[in-house]
Image: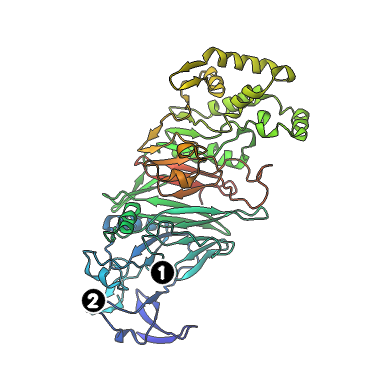
Amino acid sequence: MHKAGTTPGGRTRWQCRQGGGERTLCYSTTNPLKLATSKSGASNKRLVFNRELDPTTKRYIVTAAQNATPVHQAFFESLKQAAKHLDAELIVIPIRYKNPTSRWTLSQANAEVWADEIDPKDPKNPALPHPTKPSYLYNRRRKLNANLVLLGDIKTVPTASSPLTGFDAISGGESAILGHTKLQLKVIPTPNNKLPKILTTTGAVTVANYTDSKAGKIGEFHHMLGAVIVELEGKVFHMRHVSANHDTGEFTDLTTTYSPSGHRRAARPLALVMGDTHVDFIDPKVEAATFGRGGIVETLNPQNLVWHDLLDGYSCNPHHKDNPFNRIAKQKSGADDVGAEVRRAVEFVKARTTGDRQSVVVASNHDDFLRRWIVKTDWREDAVNAEFYLKTALKMVQGTTLNETGTSSPDPFAYWISRAGHPRVRVLAVDEAFQLGGVDLGMHGELGPNGARGSIKNLRRIGARSIVGHSHVPGIDEGCMQVGTSTRLRLEYNAGPSSWLNAHALLHADGKRQLVFIIDGNWRM
């Protein structure tokens, strides 16, 4: 141990030899050998863990650890296996929480100590780091690449119900990772056709350790054993969350399941829930990344494909009703043929429902444009669509009934999909239940509780884990995960700062969910 200068803030820097290299620690005091200690033997002074990160590293695994709390041993070992397999650097962001009811004594003192597994101590002097075993802790702010920053210097209390609140602008135009025990992700709109920025928390490697208060119990309920895997390619980054099984500590990332003893090929995902499709406006790069050679479907072979807004409904969009220029543009390009657009959507899903795979089309607001068009349009004033209109309306008339809940009419889009005769394509009715792995996949997201407009905020606490679409903005908030869009990120109706992103969601065989972002046509490094 020797003095290595001072920090810009005037604190003394000390270095110690560790594993053939040097590890720098910044203390809020003088020589670490003279650190004041509490009765429990823990330091009362706050440390800055400024370990050297390899600048050539292309992958990081980032999680968080609560002070004076044991790690989940099996999950920690699984994380180390993943770091080894992916050649990634494992980073643990330390966070604090004072818990006077904790069964671990040091928590009662709000001590600046962390489990030995992630911050090994010198057996001869617990106030000093271990001379050979590395610490995984890191609590500095650091740019991982030009568009992603690690906010390791911020400690947000683990019981925060919305840990990302207030951090929208703190990282400037860069995406950011914040250490926290609760998983939350939101996307911040950006102007000038730039990709929006992502703010996310990490999940934790430590076990749940909360007070028996209301806030503590809520924090315990949302405590997640998890981490963020980051892959860097120049200025581009790919980010994925992993969530561990609380009993075994195992977790799945894309094609691989990691356990304390190693890794293996993951079981087939239960489903791939795709960002809103809008077939006529799908981004070719997203289509290739999803269905092309080496794409998500070919690589992971999901058992089910879940489609949101399969139909765009541009030919019969009710919002175009009073706009003559939309009408002129559609007539000039042939985009005013409603039947042709419906057939394109039907053929698109048929062609991609191959092998033993099932397709499930979720009742969505754009798919419903067809029904709204039938209800509102006078076929006598639309020669292009008169025949298709009359065929569709006839089937609706024949199937319309009055029952104990009121009038019931067939869904015209579902009718035309059923006419295609594919045995493994299923169309859900509005409010029809569809669950896999304990996760509700049957909601599009436009309908909220008790007639309210749907959002991730009001669907997060309905008592069921879910994956929804609709907003074109991916997100994670408590029980609700939201996919993005499969379209180009700029369409005629989203001028101004935008938070649209191309993102799908995987539902793994163990019921864990994982967002997969598609950046410039790539879904992983």
Q: Quadrant of residue 109?
A: bottom left
Q: Residue at 37%, 85% (x, y): give it.
A: 29
User: Of the residues under marks 2 and 1, which one precedes in the sequence?
Assistant: 2
Q: Which one is nearer the viewer's eye here, 74 or 114?
A: 114
Q: Position of residue 27 (x, y in %)?
A: 38, 81
Q: In the depicted view, which residue is nearer to us: 270 or 417?
A: 417
Q: Nearer the viewer, mark 2 or mark 1?
A: 1
Position of residue 131 measured from the top left corner of the image (x, y, whole percent): 30, 77
Look at mark 2 in the image and give the residue it sits on: 123
- Amino acid at dot 1: Tyr
Crowding at dot 1, Cα within 10 Å, few <14 / some 14-19 / many 20+, comes out as: many
Q: Nearer the viewer, residue 222 or 239?
A: 222
Label 2 residue SS: loop
Q: CA distance from mark 2 to mark 1?
A: 21 Å
Image disc number at residue 387: none
Position of residue 507 relative to residue 156, above or below, is above
Q: How many marks?
A: 2
Measured along the vertical axis of the image, is residue 253 above or below residue 437?
below
Residue 192 relative to residue 451: left or right: right
Residue lying at 37% horizontally and 62% vertically, measured from the top left = 64
Q: Which residue is mark 1?
A: 138
Q: Is residue 95 visible?
A: yes
Indicate the position of residue 80 as horizontal and vertical percent values: 34, 58
Apparent side of residue 375 relative to residue 261 in the rendered image (left or right) = right
Q: Quadrant of residue 182?
A: bottom left
